[in-house]
Image (tube, rainbow, N blue to C red):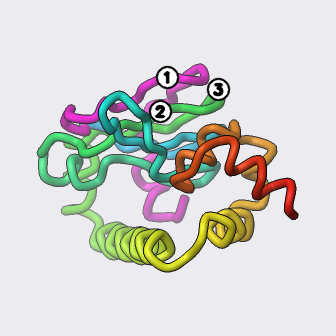
Amino acid sequence: MSTEWDKLKHLFKRQVVPAKTILLQEGQVARTMFFIEKGCLRTWVNNDGKEITTQFFFEGDKVSSIESFRSAQPSLYSIESLEPCILQTISQKDFHDALEDLPELKKEMQEHLFRRLLKSQKTFYSFLKNSPQQRYQELLEEYPHIIQRIPQHYIASYLGITSVSLSRIRNRR
């Protein structure tokens, strides 16, 4: 965290959660932002009972359903721990108050949101243009450690393919 975030340390609460813990359920309003100290989180949507993984987050990442967190609208997705995690959490109210008091933090948050938008667009266009093999390669380049940490069925879900298809792609490498 930057020095701006350090000014908020007193507002953070440490939370230790086991693997497979739902931190935010799709349809709920996000009231907390999570900073991953240790562990891995994923976001996912429910499509007629089938979970579709939309993103993975690791140490150092900030995670919230930011749209819900900022607008108090229901979240479009769930947030879940994939590993035992140590998280630093900040409440919606404390975060909003801090943004008003710390213009540098507000600027940093805008940059973070811009990077997240770019990443989302890159992922969206990759789904339109690239094969599952190419998407898998992009994922490995961005997160080389993902194979050791993420169960294969979540990776397959993220890529929009079955676990069997992912096994074939991995065997071709």
Label number found at residue 80: 2
- Residue 12 in magenta stretch: yes
Of residues 157 and 44, the one drawn nearer to the viewer in this rendering: 157
Quadrant of residue 105 within the rendered picture = bottom left
Residue drawn at the location 25% of the way across and 39% of the way down: 30
Q: Amino acid at mark 2?
A: Glu
Which stretch appears magenta?
A: 1-30
**Tags 3 and 1 touching, CB below 8 Å:** no
Q: Looking at the picture, does residue 20 appear above or below residue 72?
A: above
Quadrant of residue 90 within the rendered picture = top left
Q: Looking at the picture, does residue 158 appear above or below residue 15?
A: below
* Residue marked by disc 3: 84
In percent of width and height, residue 100 lies at 19, 62
What element does badge 2 sit on?
strand
- Is residue 122 shown to the viewer in this render? yes
* Residue marked by disc 1: 21
**How crowded is the residue under tag 1: few (<14 C-alpha within 10 Å), some, or many (20+)?**
some
In percent of width and height, residue 169 lies at 76, 58
Of the image marks 2 and 1, the number of the one nearer the N terminus: 1
Of residues 140 and 67, the one drawn nearer to the viewer in this rendering: 140
**Tags 2 and 1 touching, CB below 8 Å:** yes
**How far apart in space, not on screen, are marks 2 and 1 (Cα)?**
5 Å
- Is residue 108 shown to the viewer in this render? no
- Residue 79 in magenta stretch: no
Q: Amino acid at mark 1?
A: Thr
Does 111 sit left or right of 38 as displayed?
left
Q: Quadrant of the N terminus?
A: bottom right
Does 106 sit left or right of 5 as displayed?
left
Of the image marks 3 and 1, the number of the one nearer the N terminus: 1
Label number found at residue 51: none
